[in-house]
Image (cartoon, rainbow, N blue to C red):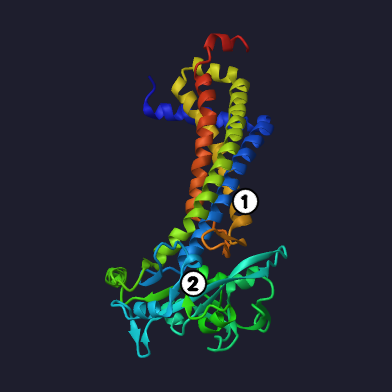
Amino acid sequence: MPGPLNWFSQIFSITKFGLMSIPKRRGAVAATIIGIAGVVAVLVGVLSIAVGFKQVMTASGSPDVAIVLRSGSDSEMVSGLDRPSTVLVADAPGIARDARGPLSSAELFVMINLPKRSTGTDANVPLRGVDAAALKVRDNVKIVSGRIFEWGKDEVIVGTGALQEFAGLEVGSKIKVGQYEWPVVGTFTANGGIGESEIWTDAKVLQAAYNRGDSFQSVYARLSSASAFNEFKDSLTSNPQLNVKVARQNEFYEEQSQVVTQLITTLGVLIAALMAMGAVFAALNTMYSAVAARTREIATLRALGFGSGAVVVSVMLESLLLALVGGMIGGSLAYFAFNNFHTSTMNFQTFSAVAFAFKVTPQLLAQGTVWAVLIGMIGGLFPAIRAARLPIAAALREL
C-alpha cells in the first residue's frame, strides 16, 4: 500500500493528465461548465430578488418604534382607529417625548394609481398621511431635495424609490389625489427601507380629500427605549377602551415580507433544481467521456501500481474543478446582471407596489458555489467508481 505522500502524488499525477486532456473533450466540458453556470446564475439571480425585497421591508424597521393597529388586522389597509384611540395611544407609558409632546404619529394609508417608468402600466402606490411628529418617530427619514410639505396644504413629498420607479413624481410636478392635483415639493430617503416606496402628506389634508372624517389606520410611536415595548404594549392591550394589536416596527415589516420572500425563494429553488438535473447529466456525460477516453491510460497507471482510490479521487477532483469554474462564472454573471437592478413588486399584504433593488450578497454567491460543488460531486461520483473498477487486463488489450 502506498504511503500518504506517494498516494497524494498519484492523485496529482492522474488529475494532471486528466486536465491536460480537456482540450480533446472541449465540447462536453464546455457544456458542463455552461450548464452549471446557468444553474448558479438562475439560483442566485432569483434569490437576489427575495433578499432585496426583504432588505427593503426591514431596513426602516426599528426595535424602539412600535406600530399600533386595530386588533385582528394584518396590515394597515384593513385597520381602523378613531381619534380618541390615537390619543390614548399617545398617552401610554413608554413613549418617548420632546418639548412638543409624545413622539407618536397617527397615520392614514391610501392607494393612488401611477404609471411605471419602465412599462407605462399603472400600479398602486401608497400615499401616507402623517402627523407632525412623523419625522421624529422615524428618525432615518431625510429630505434630500426640495422641502417638507407645509402642514395644512395639498402638498406631498416622494420617496426616492417611488421616484425612480414611477413617472411624474419629480419635484415641481403634480399628482392627482381625489379630484385635485397636488404638487410634489420634495423627495426623501428612509435608509433604503419601504418608506422610500411611499408618498407622504399631512394626514388631516388626506382625511379631507378622501372623506375619512377623523379616522386613522395606524399609530407609529417612538419608545423611550427598546426595553419599554412590553410596558407600552401591555398598557394598550389591557385598556378596556381600546381594541388594538401592538408590534415592534421591525418585526411587523419582517412579517409583511414573508409571503413574497417565501414565494420567490420556493420558485427560485424549484427552477434551479430542475436546471440542476440537466447539469448533473451533462457532468455525468463529460466525466464518463473522460473515463472512456482514458481507459488505456488509467489501466496502464493501475498496472504501474497506482491505487484505485487515487483514481476515484482524481476523477472527482476534475469534476469538482469543472463545477467550480462553472459556479464562479454563474455567480459572476448573476452579480453583474442582477445586483442593484431596480424594480418593483406587489406587497400582498397591502396590494401596493414596493420599489426595491436585487441584492446579490456574499451568502448567495456561497450558496451558488455549494450547489455547483454538489452538482460536480454527483456528476463525478459514478464515472469515478467506473474508472476505479476498470479491469486492468481487459483495458490493456486496447493498447
**Res. 139 in view:** no
Residue 346 in percent (x, y) is at: 58, 60
Please name whichever residue, 275 or 392, is drawn nearer the observer in this view of the structure. 275
Question: Residue 191 — which label?
Answer: 2
Quadrant of the rendering where the C terminus is positioned: top right
**Marks 2 and 1, how far apart in space?**
28 Å
Displayed quadrant of residue 150: bottom right
Count of numbered marks: 2
Residue at 57% of width from left, 49% of height from top? 331
In the image, which is nearer the foreground, mark 2 or mark 1? Answer: 2
Residue 266 appearing in the image: yes
Amino acid type, residue under disc 2 in the picture? Asn
Mark drawn on residue 198? none
Bin the neighbour count of mark 2 within 10 Å (Cα to Cα): few under 14, some 14-19, many 20 and up.
some
Sequence-first disc among 2 and 1: 2
Where is 140 relative to 303, above or below? below
Three-letter code for the amino acid on which mark 1 is drawn: Leu
Query: Which residue is found at the position 41% from the left and 65% from the top?
Result: 250
- 132, 397: nearer the viewer: 132
Q: Which residue is mark 1?
A: 333
Of residues 236 and 274, the one drawn nearer to the viewer in this rendering:
236
Q: Is residue 268 above or below residue 351?
A: above
Quarter of the view holding residue 209: bottom right
Secondary structure, mark 2, is loop
* Residue at x 54% of width, y 16% of height: 299
